[in-house]
């Protein structure tokens, strides 16, 4: 029996990190890829062959997550150094630093409009931030162990989180309450 689908082919090999790559994300226009690594760097790769766009140094410890904003104009990165950083992926410049949590930050997720972002951490919290004002809004605090990931629903009204406490929680963003 032959498969209707052929095996995937390697389109491009990206090489440049000095240690384990921990996270990857596509830009919305599919022209760039962001990667984060245990080497504490964020790299932005152009899809054109033989071209690495930028290497961003700033985190003091391993990068745990990278994500492009919905517009593709920003890249957020989280780290074991307890910070979140925002980078402009088409220029080499300093990042905006969010002193976000009291332990490793595991994940970042932008709202669909790119105006707010969620961070989740080993400090057992999920935090909501404004992106452009770089302002902390509030925390969700009912997990009993590390929060591995938190994501907005497609309409941004709900937030779902998962934790090492073996639970998945559903939060109402407006009321800030855990609804399941």
Image (cartoon, rainbow, N blue to C red):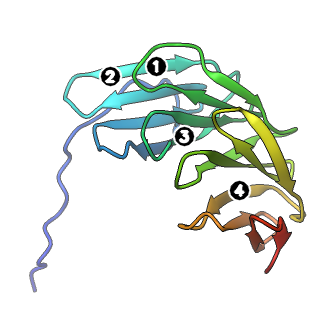
Q: Earlier in the sequence, mark 4 or mark 2?
A: 2
The answer to whether residue 10 is above or below residue 179 is above
Q: Are marks 1 and 4 in contact (CB under 8 Å)?
A: no
Q: Front-most of 142 and 6?
A: 142
The answer to whether residue 64 is above or below residue 120 is above
Q: Which residue is mark 1?
A: 55
Q: Residues within 10 Å of mark 3 (few under 14, many from 20)?
A: many
Q: Which residue is mark 3?
A: 66
Q: Which mark is residue 52?
A: 2
Farthest top residue?
Answer: 93
Q: Residues within 10 Å of mark 2 (few under 14, many from 20)?
A: some
Q: Front-most of 27 and 11?
A: 27
User: What SS does tag 4 mark?
Assistant: strand
Residue at the location (53% across, 67% down)?
154
Q: Earlier in the sequence, mark 2 or mark 3?
A: 2
Q: Earlier in the sequence, mark 3 or mark 4?
A: 3
Q: Which residue is mark 4?
A: 148
Q: Report the quarter where the C terminus lies.
A: bottom right
Cα gap from disc 2 to disc 3, whole angstroms: 16 Å
Q: Are marks 2 and 1 in contact (CB under 8 Å)?
A: yes
Q: Is residue 151 left or right of residue 56?
A: right
Residue at the location (9% across, 81% down)?
2
Residue at the location (83% across, 73% down)?
178
Q: Earlier in the sequence, mark 1 or mark 4?
A: 1
């Amino acid at each position: 029996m032959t498969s209707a689908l052929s095996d995937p082919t390697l389109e491009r090999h990206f090489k440049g990190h000095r240690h384990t790559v921990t996270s990857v994300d596509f830009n919305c226009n599919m022209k760039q890829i962001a990667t984060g690594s245990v080497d504490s760097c964020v790299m932005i790769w152009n899809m054109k062959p033989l071209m690495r766009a930028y290497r961003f140094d700033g985190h003091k410890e391993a990068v745990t997550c990278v994500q492009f904003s919905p517009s593709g104009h920003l890249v957020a990165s989280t780290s074991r150094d307890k910070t979140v950083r925002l980078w402009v992926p088409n220029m080499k410049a300093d990042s905006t630093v969010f002193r976000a949590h009291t332990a490793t930050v595991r994940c970042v997720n932008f709202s669909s409009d790119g105006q707010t972002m969620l961070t989740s951490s080993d400090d057992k919290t999920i935090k909501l931030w404004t992106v452009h004002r770089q302002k902390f809004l509030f925390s969700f605090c009912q997990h009993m162990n590390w929060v591995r990931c938190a994501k907005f629903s497609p309409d941004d009204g709900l937030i779902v989180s998962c934790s090492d406490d073996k639970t998945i929680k559903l939060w109402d963003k407006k009321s800030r309450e855990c609804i399941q």
